[in-house]
Each structure stands twice: as structure tokens, then as C-alpha cells.
Amino acid sequence: MRYGYFDDEKREYVITRPDTPLPWINYLGKENYFALISNTAGGYSFYKDARLRRLTRYRYNDVPSDSNGRYIYIRDETSGRFWSPTWQPVRLYLDEFKCRHGLGYTTILSSKFDIKTQIRYFVPPGEDLEIWDLSLTNARPDTAHLHVFSAIEFALWNALEDATNFQRNLSIGEVEIEENFILHKTEYRERRDHFAYFACSGVIVGYDTQRGSFLGRDRGWENPIAVEEGASRNSFAQGWAPIGSLQASIHLEPNKTERLIVVLGYQQNPRDQKFDPPESQNVNKNLVKPTIENYLRPSTVDLAFDELCKEWDRSLQIFQVETPDEHTNRMVNTWNQYQCMVNFNLSRSASYFESGISRGIGFRDSNQDLLGVIHMIPERARERILDLAATQLEDGGAFHQYQPLTKQGNVEIGTNFNDDPLWLVLAASAYLKETRDWDVLDELVPFENIVGSEGPLYMHLQRSIDYTLERLGPHGLPLIGRADWNDCLNLNTFSTEPDESFQTAGITDGKVAESVFIAGLFILAAEEMVQIASIRGRGQEAKEYREAAQRMEAAVLKHGWDGEWFLRAYDHFGKKVGSHSCQEGQIFIEPQGVCIMAGIGLEKGSAQRALDSVGKRLATEHGILLHQPAYTSYQTRLGEITSYPPGYKENAGVFCHTNPWIMIAEALLGNGDRAMDYYLRINPSAREHLSEVHRCEPYVYAQMIAGRDAPTFGEAKNSWLTGTAAWNYVAITQWILGIRPTYQGLCISPVLPNDWPGFSVKRKFQGVTYHIEATRIRPGNEVRLRVEGDLLPGVIVPFPPQGTSDVNVEVTLL
Ligand code: BGC
Ligand code: NOJ
């Protein structure tokens, strides 16, 4: 069952009813100002940091769900009837309803009582504000007299305090009211230099800033007294719950359309110009007024929207593909890249499953997210790599997370997730291959953000490698620390108290538990260092990295192979995890993916055996499970992984992030059919027809799909913010379509399903546009490249001479 459809031409997903299985959301903004918006206009907004600079309030876990948003009420002054053109919050049945989620904007269209409404929400590029661009059309035979109430509820900035510290909060709320805008200035009198504003164009006939006055006693957002009676209270909030609501009056002739613009924004004043007059407590509005006036003009709004669309056009033009498969096309060309960008911006902080309160920018998360965006935003990727490196510790370890506002490592969560530092090498090397910006390696970056501790980025990468090498266990495999990629495999913590963190409680010295996953990851990173060091003329270092990789491979083959698949780990007691000798958790997906990606066992057949085991034991119609059999009871020896009921999350769910590793492994072994089959099992567009089972948005990946041990097998959760986005993008574009940047040029080495006749790709790479036409002559993966008609040895198109703008590549598959 479907709840909408893809409009591929417009790059929109069109939701045709308000009652999707879960709120299906979108994101606005991609620099500093961000907003989450659901298909019925729910959600919230923040500036940079979803915890510390929350503009509007959201009620988690509320009923009905998706409580609070960007609300509009239309009241017919003749009949006294009122409704919400976005369905929420009034929830009066609408005669027509459509929500079109696009790239950086959402448009909700509806019709009620012959009044047609379109509201387009977006954040203009480069601005710290959001627009609600509302058009009302009168389809009645006579003039409509309407009042439009806009409403938002301000959060008192710190989202955690906002939800907990009422003894203070209920006394500190402050606002100022101007002719057509409201300022929310709580705490501005003391240490904040920022405030929010809410403005509306048109004829304003009333306002409210106190929630209780607007809603009335014992009422909710579905029937505010002010709207019911058609009369704002003109309330002035002091304390309690400040809101912004403006009432505009419209007289609409038959067949006429009128536009109203609502602006919600964030403004920071210079500290020495906070007040006007300076000795007063009044906000200085001189700096913000021109922005407000400007954006209340439709012409400015139109230009800004145009610019937003052009920006996305430019970003997406870098990689466009045409294949025989529509799901591949729409995900690769639009939605997968879009989701990668959202992940880059927000890491794991704010979604409908991440509260925006507890998780900042994850070290391993963001390094992996970079893999999906470097081609679109190389400058921002560079900055992110340097920011991440700056949170690395002198010993090469990394803070697991940092706060976006301060960019300082998060001390409460700390370090010693032993895979973390290696991901920095993968991100930096991907950046180098995409850009050839070798100077980045000489950038001086501090350790732990400490001034005076700076060393070149290259040194940070070296420390990442050393960190693993200095932490090897009894089998010569990397020690796992608190956890590796699998946060929930906690082999050194033995948690028995309900309120402690699985990752930090009762930690042992960690000198025994080892991770085969980190071993594979280490080889991947060390091999990148081999190439980087040789290109930089550091032959001796290259040799050492190669030897370290070889030693690690030998250790994996000797101690990390279980007979039919790669072992997962050794626990604190030196016992195997992920072995046929275990009762539960006999085979894990992660080491099969990453060890094969690292090239282990490709020639001698063990890689193929491991993949056959994955196919036999882990693959399901809803994706590949994390492990099998699921753990049926809690075991302190293994940690959080055994805390989940079987089939959910890390306990044998389909943890989608890991699936592309298997796709890549299959591609490496030349199994195009299997790679594509796995790709389509979790591709959201290919699951669209199962929306009543999948339940999350069909245009973005979810972190998890419930596994076969769960009663809700096939049900997705935790959509949007997940490493799944970047890795699927890498798997399909670089390994199945086979187009990947290398240090020597653009590699084109597709491993396609046998029934694909070919595909074409346009790839912009280092200022040159590659026009790639692939044709299959017969089944197989042998590749022949002709560049401008000339046969090329190998599969890498070398960098063309300076000044070349276009390169034509014919690819023949035999
Ligand atoms: C979740 C993991 C997540 C971790 C982050 C765990 O509870 O299950 O998926 O990575 O928390 O701290
Ligand atoms: C989600 C976390 O964000 C990611 O870092 C981790 O690798 C996975 N969970 C698996 O535990």
C-alpha cells in the first residue's frame, strides 16, 4: 500500500493523505538554520544546535503524535467555521490534501469550503530564517471574508531545560510586540545576544504572545478560543509560555488569489549593541528590521526560492545516472544524495527519533557521512574533516561526539570507542581522491582543541593508525575498547544496574577483548595510508603501513576466521563472539562486509564462503540481519546488544548501515546480481509499495528494519539520520555502477546485474564532465574502456590535460 507517489521530474515525494503510518518528514535549511517539518506541518526549528538554540517547542511522545508545528488557522468570518489547511492541528477533514516534500522545501496544498490553500515552507539560502509562503484562492462564487491566524510556540532556547526546569521557566518568558512582528527575547536581558522573531505580511488585526490567552483554559491547539471567536486577545507574555500568533484579515474576491508571507527567524545582535536605547532593556531591532521587511515581500521570497532550487540543481548535477531500474535512478539522482546532505548537516542530532537533545556530532558517524557528500560540497567537507580532527586526542583516540555550537569534544561520553579514529583516515582519503587538495594534509590542527598542540592533518591520520597498533590484544587483533562500530557490543563493560550507560559502566582495562571488525577497518585505513604516503614521497612510511596491514591480515586469517565466515570478536574472557561454537550470535554481518572490503580471502575462496554464509543465514526479504541467532536473554558479557528484544536494533535487526558493505563485497567478487538484489531489498523507493509494513518514509533510508525474530518483521524505524545513506550511495555509485575517484583518475569498473543492458552517467570530477555510456555485450564483468574512441588499458581514466571540459567514455561489459 502506498500513501503517495514520487514526482521524479520535480524531485518531490507527494503524500496524498494526512494519515501516513508515522509523520513523514522533511528538513529545511542546510547551513545554520534548520527546521524539521512533517507532512501535516509538525516539527520544530533551531539555529545550529538542536539542544542549545531551539526556537520552537516540540512535545515528544505526545498524543496525538507530532504535537506542535507551524500552524495556520483559517476562519471564515461569515460562517464562523475554521480549519487548518495543513490538517494539523484542527484535524478537520480536508476536501483535498497533498504534501509535496521537495529538496529543502515542503509545500502543503489543500482545499476546504472552496478555499484553496498552498503553503510553501523553506529556508532561504544563507539566511537564518524560514518562510511560510501562503497563497489562498477563493473558488466560491462570492467574496470570502477570512481571518488567518498563524501560530508557533517558542521554546526557551535550551531544549533540555525547556522540558524540565519549570520552576524557573514559567517566570522568565519575555516578548516584545511590534506592528507586524513579535520578538521572543527570553534571557536576552542577561547572557543571550540572540532573539527570535515571528512576522506576517498583510493586514494584521490582532496578535497573541501568551499561550494560555490564545488557547483558553483547558483547550489545545485544535480549538484555540481566539480562533473560535475570531478575536485575538492581544496578550502580552510575561513568564508562562510565550507564543507567536498574528491574525491577518483578508477579503478575497471570487477566483482571486492572495499571498501572505510568514517569517520566523533568528537574530544575533553584537553584544555592545544589544539594547536600544542602550540604557534600556529593549531589544535593538535596527539590524533585524531590514531583513524582516525584505522577506515579507513576495518578490524576495520568489527569488530566494529560485536560488534554493538552483543550488540543488548544481549539487545534483555532479552525479546523474540513467539505469534500467527506476528505484536506482531516483535514489541515486535525488533522494539518496539529499539524505546524505541532511546527515552531513545534522549528524545524529535531530530527527523524529533523535530528540536533538542528547547526541551531537558523532566522530565515526560524521566521518562516514562525509563519504556521501564530498563530491557536492568539497569546501564544507574539508572544514568538517579539520573540525573532527581537532577533537582527536594526542594518543590518536577521539571524542566520540562533539557539540556543534562549541565544536568541543563531549566529555560525558568520552573516548575509547576503538574504531573511531580509523574513520578519519577513510574520510580524509575520500576527500583527497575527490579533490586532489593535497595541501589539506599540511593544515595545522590541534589535538583536543588545545591551542599550542597543533600538528599537520597528516600527523592526525598517522596517530589514528598508531592508536590501533598500540592497542592490539592477545591474538594480534585490535582491542575493542568500549565498543566498535556496533555501539551495543560492549565486551569490556559489565552493566547490572538499570540506570548506567552500557558503554561506560564498570569498564575493565580492556586488554583482552578484540574486534575482527576493527581489524578489517584498520586494513582499509592502512592501505589508504600506503597510497597517501607514497604519493607524498614518504616511501619508508608507506612500507611500514603496508607491513602493518599485512600483519593484520595474517592475524585475521589465523584467529579471525571461523571456518565458514569471519568471527566477530573475542570477549573479555578470550571467548569467541560470532562463531559456530556460540549458542546465539553465531554469525555477524559486520566482519563479513568489512574484511572482504579489505581484500581478505578474495583469492583463496574464504570471502566467497563468508558471503554464501551471509546469504544462507542472514539475508531476508527485508534486508540482511545483523546477526543470527538473535540473543534471547540479557548477558552482561556482551552488553547492550542483548538488551534489545530479538529482532530489534542491534539484536538481529536489519541494521541497514551494514547492508551496503555486503553489496560492496559482492561487487568485489563480481556478483552483480546479488549486489543489486541486496541493494533493492532495503532501497526505500523499492519498498514504497509496502508502506503499511515499512511505515517510515519511502524516500529516505531508515537506520533499522525489524528482523525476522521480531513480531513486526519488515517495519522500519529511525529514519533519516543514519550512516545507511552514505554507505548505500557509495555501494551503488562506486561499486555497482563502479564509478569511483582514485588517486590516479576516475575508475570505471561496473559490476552489474546480468540482465542490465547498460547505463549512462554524467559525473563531474575535478572540473571535468565525464559522459559515461556503458553497454553490456554479454554477461560478465570484464570491462573495456574507450576514451574519446581510444581503447584504454585498465579501468582508470587518467586525469585529462588541463583545460579539458568534457571526456567521453564508452564502457563495454563482456
Ligand atoms: C543505540 C545505538 C546507538 C547508541 C548511541 C544505542 O542505544 O542502540 O544504535 O548507536 O545508543 O549511543
Ligand atoms: C548508531 C550510531 O550512530 C552509529 O555510530 C553506530 O555505528 C550504530 N548505531 C551501530 O551501533
Image (cartoon, rainbow, N blue to C red):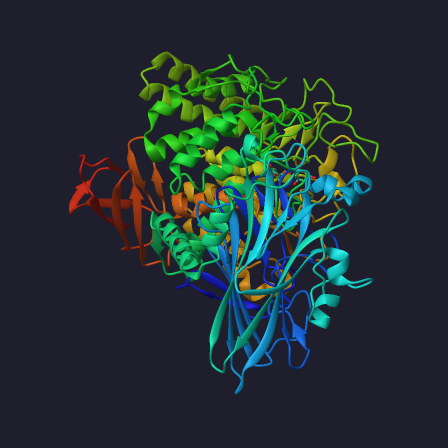
Q: Quadrant of the N terminus?
A: bottom right
Instruction: Give the residue at the far bottom of this rendering.
Output: 141
Q: Nearer the viewer, residue 356 or 3?
A: 356
Answer with the quarter of the image where residue 225 lies: bottom right
User: What residue is rendered at 78% in x and 28% in y?
Assistant: 494
Q: Is residue 95 above or below residue 192?
A: below
How far across and how far down the image is residue 640, in percent?
73, 36
Question: Would you say 736 lies left or right of 632 here?
Answer: left
Question: Number of marks in the image?
Answer: 0
User: From where the camera sits, is residue 563 visible?
Assistant: no
How far across and how far down the image is residue 611, in percent?
52, 43
Question: Would you say 796 lies left or right of 655 here?
Answer: left
How far across and how far down the image is residue 523, in percent?
48, 26
Q: Nearer the viewer, residue 57 or 66?
A: 57
Q: Quadrant of ligand 2?
A: top right
User: What residue is rendered at 35% in x and 35% in y?
Assistant: 434
User: From where the camera sits, is residue 633 visible?
Assistant: yes
Question: Would you say 18 lies left or right of 798 here?
Answer: right
Q: Is residue 500 above or below residue 246?
A: above
How far across and how far down the image is residue 724, in percent?
54, 45
User: What residue is rendered at 65% in x and 32% in y?
Assistant: 191
Q: Nearer the viewer, residue 613 or 467?
A: 467
